[in-house]
């Protein structure tokens, strides 16, 4: 059984080297058969491709002529590989040395599982590079830590997920036209069909989070916008929140769930959450603004 590791990248010169070396290092843990494909859409003058080409071990580099959102990058990677299991990690993340083995062991021993995701930990949580990285991490990845319960999930961040190729062929591809939420339709199709996406803590990646408040708030806005568009376009769970009479609840709901997940799964972070709830709420207000604009844009297109 062969695994394809697929990495979409865009202007990732500061992180792609560490990402690739971490994946390659998984060979030291086992002799599992896997290859690596990078799909890069960086502009002329960016050095991401130069780093990939001189990394020092074999891989496939696919160069796209124009900017591609991660969904398209992943789809192109799938189209240009032929392995049995498709493994996705982002260019700004690094894999634990046991990452590929954890994926392989789960999907080769439990045939009833079609996809498997794992823990997403904060790569830059320690000084001097932490700043507000904990806030960015809470907003995106609370509920995906080492204390999270293992078992079936409705969604999983694509920074750390693997899917059987036959399942991807049946339920995919990823959405290509937007940044963020590119995976929700695929996972929803799986759930509706009774297919299992399983979460396991042993499958670990470390994500480099944004560290500046303005960057975090802007990113939350973009995620909110893509979420709003997806909820309306595909009538996904949570679509009722597009109603203006209810949408104001979005930041309160999301802030509540961040706190709940930290309290129940990452208790050591909960006191910091209590002291910084106002920042979580502010970030979620940016998500809410983006959500409203995403809903509005889709409804405007339908008129």
Image (cartoon, rainbow, N blue to C red):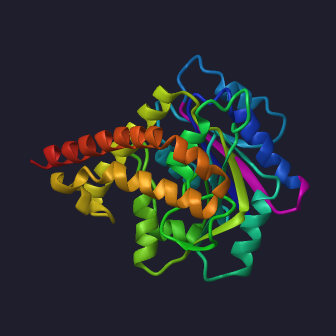
Q: How many marks?
A: 0
* Residue 302, image x, y percentages: 14, 49
Residue at the location (51% across, 60% down)? 260
Residue positioned most to the left: 303
Q: Is residue 150 visible?
A: yes
Q: Is residue 1 visible?
A: no
- Say left or right for 187 vs 130: left
Q: Examine the rendered structure and indicate whether residue 71 appears above or below residue 146.
A: above
Question: Which quadrant of the figure has residue 152?
Answer: bottom right
In magenta segment, residue 171? no
Residue positioned most to the top: 45
- Say left or right for 92 vs 295: right
Question: Which quadrant of the figure has residue 232?
Answer: bottom left
* Residue 257, image x, y percentages: 46, 58
Residue at the location (33% across, 66% down)? 237
Residue at the location (46% across, 30% down)? 66
* Residue 300, image x, y percentages: 14, 44
* Residue 145, image x, y percentages: 65, 58
Q: Examine the rendered structure and indicate whether residue 51 appears above or below residue 224.
A: above
Of residue 254 and residue 141, the one placed in the foreground of this image is 254
For the record, the magenta segment spans 28-41
In magenta segment, residue 29? yes
Question: Which quadrant of the figure has residue 92?
Answer: top right
Of residue 217 and residue 200, the one placed in the foreground of this image is 217
Of residue 246 and residue 6, the one placed in the foreground of this image is 246
Residue at the location (56% across, 32% down)? 10
- Say left or right for 286 vs 260: left
Q: Quadrant of the N terminus?
A: bottom right
């Amino acid at each position: 059984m062969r695994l394809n590791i697929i990495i979409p990248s865009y202007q990732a010169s500061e992180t792609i080297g560490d990402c690739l070396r971490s994946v390659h290092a998984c060979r030291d843990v086992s002799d599992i058969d896997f290859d690596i494909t990078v799909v890069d859409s960086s502009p002329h003058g960016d050095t991401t491709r130069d780093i990939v080409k001189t990394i020092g071990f074999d891989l496939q580099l696919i160069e796209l002529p124009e900017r591609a959102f991660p969904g398209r990058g992943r789809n192109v990677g799938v189209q240009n590989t032929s392995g049995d299991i498709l493994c996705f990690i982002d260019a700004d993340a690094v894999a634990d040395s046991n990452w590929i083995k954890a994926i392989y062991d789960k999907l080769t021993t439990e045939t009833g599982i079609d996809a498997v995701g794992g823990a997403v930990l904060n790569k830059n949580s320690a000084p001097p590079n932490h700043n507000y990285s904990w806030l960015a991490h809470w907003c995106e990845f609370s509920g995906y830590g080492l204390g999270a319960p293992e078992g079936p999930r409705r969604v999983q961040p694509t920074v750390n997920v693997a899917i059987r190729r036959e399942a991807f062929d049946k339920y995919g591809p990823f959405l290509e036209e937007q940044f963020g939420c590119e995976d929700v339709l695929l996972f929803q199709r799986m759930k509706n069909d009774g297919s299992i996406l399983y979460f396991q803590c042993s499958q670990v990646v470390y994500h480099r989070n944004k560290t500046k408040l303005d960057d975090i708030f802007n990113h939350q806005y973009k995620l909110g916008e893509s979420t709003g568009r997806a909820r309306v376009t595909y009538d996904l769970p949570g679509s009722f929140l597009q109603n203006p009479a209810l949408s104001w609840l979005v930041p309160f709901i999301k802030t509540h769930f961040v706190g709940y997940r930290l309290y129940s799964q990452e208790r050591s972070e909960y006191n910091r959450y209590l002291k910084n709830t106002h920042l979580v709420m502010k970030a979620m207000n940016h998500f809410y603004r983006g959500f409203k604009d995403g809903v509005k844009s889709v409804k405007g297109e339908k008129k």
